[in-house]
């Protein structure tokens, strides 16, 4: 993986991440496609929205449809027919958030499936192998997400465990990184999943239109996945610093800040992010996991975060909560029932260009599936436009620190 | 409304329906958009699929969001931002199918809302006014859908009632047809809902991109809605003939065959359709309501039906039942879990071009909303392609009588 910084604006950085499946302009917001789908939104619409990188959840994909199945179908890219970059998490966070009965040992975590209660085990090695099988462009070291609040001793022990798992993750990654589903193809030229996985007869019937969209020529420098390490350490700035320094010592292609947005006050999140960022190398991408609101993604980009992900835009959409340049709108409210205006007057997305608030309110009130589809498209569009404006602002050196500043800049 | 027949192939007719909102090539299958939405599919995708006419349900729209609300927002076209033709039913069928406690009198039907149990009343006059308020291009006379089976005396009385309601519907339509939401605009030039309903400030902020898509110039001949009559008469060919003749005597722009597909055997449906068609005028469109499977729509088009609608493609899609050129597929089956091939090898829709059966099976099994979205798009595409092939076959005089014959013709 290559990472180039093109411009700086105070702490903020405008960068370009080169992955085996294309470029990603940073700072970037990554939509969450938990089970190989951004809920309700087809991949061609994500293309149109300009999504350059998606996040998939290893925990969910491991349980259903299963790693081996996805691997045989061309990895996550081939399976879901997504031609741009993908990042998978290690499963550590879901084991933490979806399993009250998990059991953590030095070796790994035993947990129960939220689907059927069956018992499973993740170790640094198996979580890394699972992510190699899924074949995302960026994968994460296996970590323990420390709960909040926690005693100092507990936070230190958890951080130490994450560091040992980080070493084991890296070791297993180095041994197996060439097992990625697209590695053998990438040696011999452009990827084409259809060539590998669809039968001859099907392809000829389809008149050369293969299933799965293959990326173009791979660059020699980006022919394998990149492994990121995760900084833990709870809400103690000294432990965070130690975790950062020792994770950097192990050596990764990028560094994530994990274990935040787990219930602690927002001001504390910001304080920990800011102090941790100081200890991360400037020439590697910095990924803040599970953050945040539109205001927060602008703020953290300004602090120097390059990558973020959050379920908020997609989950809020399903509950009728819509983000606009004029603030949040709860579209279920009766006040919008006769409102002929667009959701957001200055948004150019396909929802705001075509439908009225009255129609969106009706769809939500009538429990129409299209409500979820359109609401999600708009919220993602708003997040992506916000980050596009943040990048433009960095390029121009405008020092935009807040959402309202970003949205009052003249358009690109 | 204008209707022109361009070619005949035995009983089948290739025609063109000119409506205030564009042309409709017949025979046509009309997707059902019950509550101003084809469940899960955005209007721009319906555009791409080549949908020229949609069906809306007056009963549902009357209950939610309400007729007056839709009228003020530009009628159904403006409300849902749909620029092509729309047909609304009279509400008679839903009152019949969704209300076990309905009470029918000479004056009309008292029924309870399936949403909240509240009591409502539809008469020939109020159902006609509701449809004028919704502003569909084609609206239907209010009828009683006779149940099956029914005693001969009951079928006759029900048919007589429908005939009296047909006269009353026509009278009210003639008195009020200029009250259609777009009538006043159509007198003075092209329709533009944005001009009427979006505020100046919103429009200027949106840089001339108005909400709601206005149709082009209206033709003088098609500046009002068209009212269709409905033939009833149960499964008695003599009563059907009498109903047809007396409905024609009242005089409508087109004629529908109602009261079928309500539980009678399929062979009987076909027999009644065939015998009824003989008594309908050749120069007016013939609409068979609530039919049918892919096999049936081909068969009925061959018999001389011009218009059909059915919830089958959209409802079946939600249950994972997919129609293909090779037959029906239940995508939930485990046999598709590792199937890298496309759903239908010779279908060119955006689903078959991009996704594998394995992915579609996964989406369904994981209860992902995208399953419903993609399945519905494919099924609609299959229905619309089938009718496109039927029209092509009529044009070439190929006498294709069955679905398999239609799909083995060389492509257009």
Image: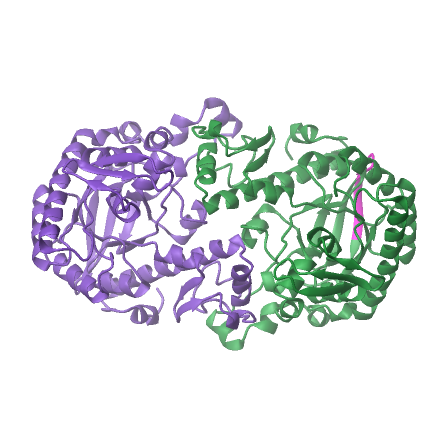
Chain colours: A purple, B green
The residue at 77%/59% (across/down) is B103
Q: Give the range drawn in magenta.
A: B3-12
The count of marks equals 0
Q: Nearer the viewer, residue B174 or A412?
A: B174
* Residue B355 visible in the snapshot: no
Tell whether position B5 is magenta.
Answer: yes
| Figure check: B319 above or below A10 | above
* Residue B334 visible in the snapshot: yes
Quadrant hosting residue A241: bottom left
Q: Nearer the viewer, residue B315 or B404?
A: B315
Q: Position of residue B44 (x, y in %)?
A: 55, 53
Q: Quadrant of the C terminus of chain B?
A: top right
Tell whether position B87 is magenta.
Answer: no
**Would you say the magenta stretch is mainly helix, strand or loop?**
strand
The residue at 84%/39% (across/down) is B272
Q: In which quarter of the image is the N terminus of chain B?
A: bottom right
Q: Position of residue A372 (x, y in %)?
A: 47, 55
Q: Position of residue B14 (x, y in %)?
A: 76, 42
Quadrant hosting residue A267: bottom left
Task: Locate residue A97 relative to residue B221 in the image: left or right.
Answer: left
| Figure check: B293 above or below A255 | above
Q: Nearer the viewer, residue A93 or A42?
A: A93
Q: Position of residue B120 (x, y in %)?
A: 71, 65
């Amino acid at each position: 993986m290559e990472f180039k910084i093109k411009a700086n604006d105070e702490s903020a950085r405008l960068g370009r991440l080169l992955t085996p499946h294309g470029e990603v302009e940073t700072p970037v917001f990554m939509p969450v496609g938990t089970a190989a789908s951004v809920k309700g939104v087809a991949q061609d619409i994500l293309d149109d929205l300009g999504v350059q990188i998606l996040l998939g959840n290893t925990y969910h994909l491991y349980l259903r449809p299963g790693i081996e199945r996805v691997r045989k179908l061309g990895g996550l890219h081939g399976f879901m027919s997504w031609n741009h970059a993908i990042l998978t998490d290690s499963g550590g966070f879901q084991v933490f958030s979806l399993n009250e009965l998990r059991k953590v040992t030095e070796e790994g975590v035993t947990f129960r499936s939220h689907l059927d209660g069956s018992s499973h085990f993740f170790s640094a090695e198996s979580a890394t192998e699972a992510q190699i099988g899924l074949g995302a462009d960026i994968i994460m070291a296996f970590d323990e997400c420390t709960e909040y609040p926690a005693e100092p001793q507990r936070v230190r022990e958890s951080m130490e465990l994450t560091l040992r798992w980080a070493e084991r993750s890296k070791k297993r990654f180095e041994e197996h990184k060439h097992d990625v589903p697209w590695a053998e193809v990438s040696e011999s030229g452009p990827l084409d999943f259809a060539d590998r996985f669809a039968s001859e007869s099907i392809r000829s019937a389809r008149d050369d239109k293969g299933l799965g969209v293959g990326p173009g020529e791979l660059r020699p420098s980006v022919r394998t996945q990149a492994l990121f390490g995760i900084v833990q350490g709870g809400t103690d700035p000294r432990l965070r610093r130690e975790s950062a320094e020792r994770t950097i010592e192990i050596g990764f292609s990028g560094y994530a800040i994990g274990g935040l947005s787990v219930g602690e006050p927002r001001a504390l999140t910001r304080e920990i992010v800011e102090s941790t960022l100081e200890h991360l190398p400037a020439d590697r991408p910095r990924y803040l996991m599970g953050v945040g609101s539109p205001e927060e993604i602008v703020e953290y980009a300004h602090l120097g975060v390059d990558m973020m992900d959050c379920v908020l835009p997609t989950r809020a959409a399903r509950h009728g909560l819509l983000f606009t340049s004029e603030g949040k709108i709860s579209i279920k409210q009766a006040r919008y029932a006769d409102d002929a205006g667009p959701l957001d007057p200055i948004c150019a997305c396909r929802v705001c260009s075509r439908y009225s608030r009255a129609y969106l309110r009706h769809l939500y009130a009538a429990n129409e599936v299209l409500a979820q589809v359109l609401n999600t498209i708009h919220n993602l569009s708003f997040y992506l436009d916000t980050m596009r404006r943040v990048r433009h602002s960095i390029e121009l050196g405008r020092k935009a620190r807040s959402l309202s500043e970003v949205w009052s800049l003249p358009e690109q």
